[in-house]
Protein backbone atom coordinates (compact mmCIF):
# COMPACT_ATOMS: atom_id res chain seq x y z
CA UNK A 1 0.00 0.00 0.00
CA UNK A 2 1.22 3.48 -0.79
CA UNK A 3 0.26 6.62 1.11
CA UNK A 4 0.95 10.30 0.71
CA UNK A 5 1.01 12.48 3.83
CA UNK A 6 0.65 16.03 2.63
CA UNK A 7 1.17 19.07 4.87
CA UNK A 8 0.13 22.59 4.02
CA UNK A 9 1.18 26.12 4.94
CA UNK A 10 3.17 26.97 8.05
CA UNK A 11 3.50 23.34 9.12
CA UNK A 12 7.23 23.57 8.27
CA UNK A 13 7.44 25.77 11.40
CA UNK A 14 6.10 23.12 13.77
CA UNK A 15 8.01 22.92 17.02
CA UNK A 16 8.50 26.67 17.26
CA UNK A 17 5.10 27.80 15.97
CA UNK A 18 2.62 28.41 18.82
CA UNK A 19 3.85 25.34 20.77
CA UNK A 20 1.01 25.85 23.30
CA UNK A 21 -1.38 24.88 20.49
CA UNK A 22 0.66 22.66 18.19
CA UNK A 23 3.20 21.12 20.59
CA UNK A 24 6.99 21.07 20.46
CA UNK A 25 7.34 18.23 17.98
CA UNK A 26 8.87 19.35 14.68
CA UNK A 27 7.65 18.26 11.27
CA UNK A 28 10.91 16.29 10.88
CA UNK A 29 10.06 14.48 14.15
CA UNK A 30 6.58 13.72 12.83
CA UNK A 31 8.01 12.45 9.55
CA UNK A 32 10.33 10.12 11.49
CA UNK A 33 7.37 8.82 13.53
CA UNK A 34 5.39 8.23 10.34
CA UNK A 35 8.29 6.49 8.59
CA UNK A 36 8.77 4.14 11.54
CA UNK A 37 5.03 3.44 11.57
CA UNK A 38 4.98 2.89 7.80
CA UNK A 39 7.67 0.26 8.12
CA UNK A 40 5.74 -1.43 10.92
CA UNK A 41 2.49 -1.69 8.95
CA UNK A 42 4.16 -2.28 5.58
CA UNK A 43 3.29 0.94 3.83
CA UNK A 44 5.26 2.82 1.19
CA UNK A 45 5.17 6.41 2.46
CA UNK A 46 5.68 9.74 0.77
CA UNK A 47 5.80 12.70 3.17
CA UNK A 48 5.62 16.24 1.84
CA UNK A 49 5.00 19.84 2.87
CA UNK A 50 4.33 23.01 0.91
CA UNK A 51 3.30 26.55 1.73
CA UNK A 52 1.82 26.93 -1.76
CA UNK A 53 -1.75 26.04 -2.63
CA UNK A 54 -0.94 25.13 -6.24
CA UNK A 55 1.85 22.78 -5.19
CA UNK A 56 -0.58 21.00 -2.86
CA UNK A 57 -3.08 20.72 -5.72
CA UNK A 58 -0.40 19.29 -8.03
CA UNK A 59 0.50 16.74 -5.36
CA UNK A 60 -3.16 15.66 -5.11
CA UNK A 61 -3.33 15.30 -8.91
CA UNK A 62 -0.19 13.13 -8.88
CA UNK A 63 -1.61 11.01 -6.06
CA UNK A 64 -4.49 10.02 -8.30
CA UNK A 65 -2.23 7.72 -10.30
CA UNK A 66 0.48 6.88 -7.82
CA UNK A 67 -1.02 6.47 -4.31
CA UNK A 68 -3.66 4.32 -2.67
CA UNK A 69 -4.63 7.09 -0.28
CA UNK A 70 -3.77 10.51 1.10
CA UNK A 71 -3.62 12.05 4.57
CA UNK A 72 -3.96 15.81 4.30
CA UNK A 73 -3.25 18.47 6.88
CA UNK A 74 -4.10 21.46 4.73
CA UNK A 75 -3.39 24.01 7.49
CA UNK A 76 -5.30 27.25 7.01
CA UNK A 77 -6.21 26.32 3.41
CA UNK A 78 -8.67 23.95 5.08
CA UNK A 79 -10.85 26.95 5.82
CA UNK A 80 -10.44 28.82 2.54
CA UNK A 81 -9.67 26.59 -0.41
CA UNK A 82 -12.43 25.51 -2.76
CA UNK A 83 -9.58 24.71 -5.16
CA UNK A 84 -8.21 22.06 -2.79
CA UNK A 85 -11.71 20.68 -2.31
CA UNK A 86 -12.13 20.36 -6.09
CA UNK A 87 -8.71 18.70 -6.38
CA UNK A 88 -9.71 16.10 -3.79
CA UNK A 89 -13.00 15.51 -5.61
CA UNK A 90 -11.12 14.67 -8.78
CA UNK A 91 -8.28 12.80 -7.08
CA UNK A 92 -10.28 9.55 -6.96
CA UNK A 93 -8.27 8.31 -3.98
CA UNK A 94 -9.48 8.31 -0.39
CA UNK A 95 -8.35 11.36 1.59
CA UNK A 96 -8.31 11.64 5.39
CA UNK A 97 -8.42 15.16 6.79
CA UNK A 98 -6.01 15.70 9.64
CA UNK A 99 -5.30 18.49 12.11
CA UNK A 100 -3.03 18.56 15.13
CA UNK A 101 -5.43 20.82 17.02
CA UNK A 102 -9.15 20.36 17.56
CA UNK A 103 -10.34 22.94 15.02
CA UNK A 104 -13.88 22.81 16.46
CA UNK A 105 -12.67 23.93 19.90
CA UNK A 106 -10.91 26.98 18.44
CA UNK A 107 -11.89 30.23 16.70
CA UNK A 108 -15.16 30.07 14.79
CA UNK A 109 -13.37 30.76 11.48
CA UNK A 110 -11.69 27.36 11.90
CA UNK A 111 -15.02 25.54 12.26
CA UNK A 112 -15.68 25.59 8.51
CA UNK A 113 -13.68 23.03 6.56
CA UNK A 114 -13.78 22.74 2.78
CA UNK A 115 -11.94 19.43 3.15
CA UNK A 116 -14.43 17.60 5.39
CA UNK A 117 -17.20 17.17 2.77
CA UNK A 118 -14.81 15.39 0.40
CA UNK A 119 -12.75 13.44 2.95
CA UNK A 120 -13.58 9.89 4.05
CA UNK A 121 -13.06 11.05 7.63
CA UNK A 122 -11.44 13.53 9.95
CA UNK A 123 -8.93 13.19 12.76
CA UNK A 124 -8.19 16.28 14.82
CA UNK A 125 -7.10 17.24 18.30
CA UNK A 126 -4.58 14.47 18.99
CA UNK A 127 -1.41 16.38 18.14
CA UNK A 128 1.42 14.51 16.45
CA UNK A 129 -0.19 11.17 17.38
CA UNK A 130 -2.96 12.00 14.91
CA UNK A 131 -0.60 11.25 12.04
CA UNK A 132 -0.14 7.59 12.98
CA UNK A 133 -3.82 7.32 13.93
CA UNK A 134 -4.65 8.57 10.43
CA UNK A 135 -2.26 6.05 8.86
CA UNK A 136 -3.99 3.21 10.73
CA UNK A 137 -7.41 4.56 9.75
CA UNK A 138 -6.42 4.83 6.09
CA UNK A 139 -4.82 1.39 6.11
CA UNK A 140 -7.96 -0.18 7.60
CA UNK A 141 -10.09 1.65 5.07
CA UNK A 142 -7.96 0.44 2.16
CA UNK A 143 -7.88 -3.13 3.42
CA UNK A 144 -11.58 -3.11 4.27
CA UNK A 145 -10.92 -4.18 7.85
CA UNK A 146 -12.74 -2.92 10.92
C1 LIG B 1 -4.11 23.03 11.60
C2 LIG B 1 -5.35 23.83 12.01
C3 LIG B 1 -5.58 25.01 11.08
O1 LIG B 1 -6.72 25.75 11.50
C4 LIG B 1 -4.38 25.94 11.10
O2 LIG B 1 -4.56 26.99 10.19
C5 LIG B 1 -3.11 25.21 10.85
C6 LIG B 1 -2.88 23.92 11.49
C7 LIG B 1 -3.77 21.92 12.62
O3 LIG B 1 -3.02 21.00 12.27
O4 LIG B 1 -4.23 21.98 13.78
O5 LIG B 1 -2.21 25.71 10.17
O6 LIG B 1 -4.36 22.41 10.35
Image (cartoon, helix red, strand yellow):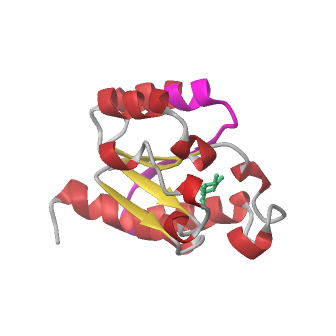
Which residue is at a point 50% across and 66% down the rendered structure image?
Answer: 104
On whether residue 56 falls in the magenta region, the answer is: yes
- The percent coordinates of residue 75 (x first, y second) are 61, 49
Expressed as whole percent of the image width and height from the top left, the position of residue 27 reads 70, 58
Work out whether 64 lies above or below 29. Answer: above
Closer to us: 132 or 77: 77
Asked if 107 appears above or below 55 in the picture, the reply is: below
- Magenta stretch: residue 20 in it? no
Judged left or right of residue 139, residue 12 is right
Outermost residue, front side: 108
Compare residues 78 and 105 and report the one nearer the observer. Answer: 105
Please report the residue visible at 52 percent of the width from the left and 45 percent of the height from the top.
78
Residue span colored magenta = 39-57
Residue 116 in percent (x, y) is at 37, 50
- Image location of residue 54, percent across then percent down: 59, 24
Q: Quadrant of the C terminus?
A: bottom left
- Residue shown at the point (38%, 60%) measured from the top left: 122
Question: As displayed, is residue 135 above or below residue 3?
Answer: below
Please indicate, yes or no, whether residue 137 appears anywhere in the rendered image. yes
Q: Quadrant of ligand 1?
A: bottom right
Amino acid sequence: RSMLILNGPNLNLLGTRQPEIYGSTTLADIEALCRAHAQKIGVDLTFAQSNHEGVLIDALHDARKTKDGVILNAGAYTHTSIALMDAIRSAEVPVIELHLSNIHARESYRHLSYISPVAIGLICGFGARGYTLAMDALYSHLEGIA
